[in-house]
Amino acid sequence: MAALAATLVAAVPAVAATPRPAASDWAQEGHDATHDGFNPDEYRITAGTLSRLVQRWSISTTGGAVEQQAPIVAGSQLFLADSAGIRAYLAATGAADWQFALPASDNPQAPAVATDGQSVVAYLRTGELISLDTATGSVRWRSPVPSNAPAGRVLLDRGVVVAGGNDGENLGVWAFEAATGKPLWHRLGLDPQWPVADGKMLLSRPYRGGLQAVDLATGRVAWETENDWFGYAADPTGRFFLVGQDTVLLKVRADSGRVVWQAGGLSGSPAVDHDRVYIAAEDNPEMIVAVDLHTGEQRWRLAAGLMPSVAGGLLWASHSSPEQGWQLEALDPATGVPFDLPAAVHSAGGVERAVVTHGWLYTTDGATLRAFTVG
């Protein structure tokens, strides 16, 4: 156990310059490396245009594939992963562009994916990280990631791609140069968390307890805490982490780990805009609680759904019932008041975050992706 938890940091060369996605792209789970679920650059789908949203196309999984993920979007391309592989489509039409197939498995799982606009990186649950050319789907490089964690994470920021997790036997985090696949550093016995802030990411210590903040490019420890924090997201400025400890939400400084405020009775994947954190209540996962980002004070709460995202001045969330299935809601972020939606949009909720970017709304129920835009 002690050997597994040992820290191994390789000598780190300079990271090659790589392209960054456009600010309005939805380039990885949660929009960008902050994983805040917030797209501040959406201007077409707003409260004033909701009534004109119409469905343009849909894509369903085929051949027994499962676990259709929320799409990632870069410019005119959309990338969709499920247990059968990764496929690229034209975002405006849903027309197929290319596909990267995964072999059949007795335990099929979708890869985690992210893009910088020129490459799509995918953490395959078989224990491998690959980089695909966005134009052709051809493999640019591939590198082993010894942990084939079923809930492992991948993030891409500042020319560095990080993957890893805990598969019950192997636990660790591995960082690579995004342009070339060159190994940069790795740490064993630690579990990567979602967000990046101030050039740092968070690694939990499952065996010892506590958490470290490490430099994304080098893996060097910037600060650490004995608290068992889970990294949910960073704020849009990239200066603060939003972390959870049991059912307490904390805002902490990314440069030092100092706690700014804490609020109890909250847990789950939040969305974070410039004013508020939107997160689930401890006793009801579909109860969204809006917390002031600057003070930690509660502003409103509403039983509105799961997996919130914010774009165009709207808060999106999905909820389900045995009678009506999945439904999608659009709320006023300041008050929680719901807006009226066209019936086709309202009935298009799902298990993943709603993705809103480049004037399009994408939702998936895990089997079918639906795309809406203003008519």
Image (cartoon, rainbow, N blue to C red):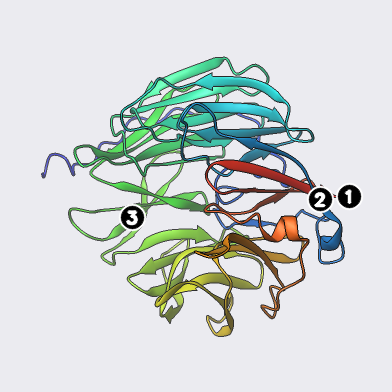
Among numbered discs 3 and 2, the one appearing first in the sequence: 2
Q: Residue at x 45, y 35 (%)?
A: 110
| Label 3 element class | strand
| Circles 1 and 2: CB atoms closer than 8 Å | yes
Q: Nearer the viewer, residue 321 or 121?
A: 321
Q: CA distance from mark 1 to mark 3?
A: 48 Å
Point out residue 206 in the picture as x, y percentages from the top left corner.
Answer: 23, 54
- In screen coordinates, is 80 left or right of 264? right
Q: Residues within 10 Å of mark 2 (few under 14, many from 20)?
A: some
| Label 2 element class | strand
| Label 1 element class | loop
Q: Residue at x 52, y 30 (%)?
A: 121
Amino acid type, callout 3: Gln
Which residue position is annotated with label 3? 212
Q: Residues within 10 Å of mark 3 (few under 14, many from 20)?
A: many
Which residue position is annotated with label 2? 54
Residue 338 visible from this viewpoint: yes
In this view, the residue farthest toward the front is 323
Q: Residue at x 53, y 16 (%)?
A: 139
Give the label on residue 252, or none: none
Which residue position is annotated with label 1? 375
Amino acid type, callout 2: Val
Q: Nearer the viewer, residue 222 or 121?
A: 121
Q: CA distance from mark 3 to mark 2?
A: 46 Å
Residue 27 visible from this viewpoint: no
- In screen coordinates, is 14 left or right of 212? right
Mark 1 or 3: the one toward you: 1
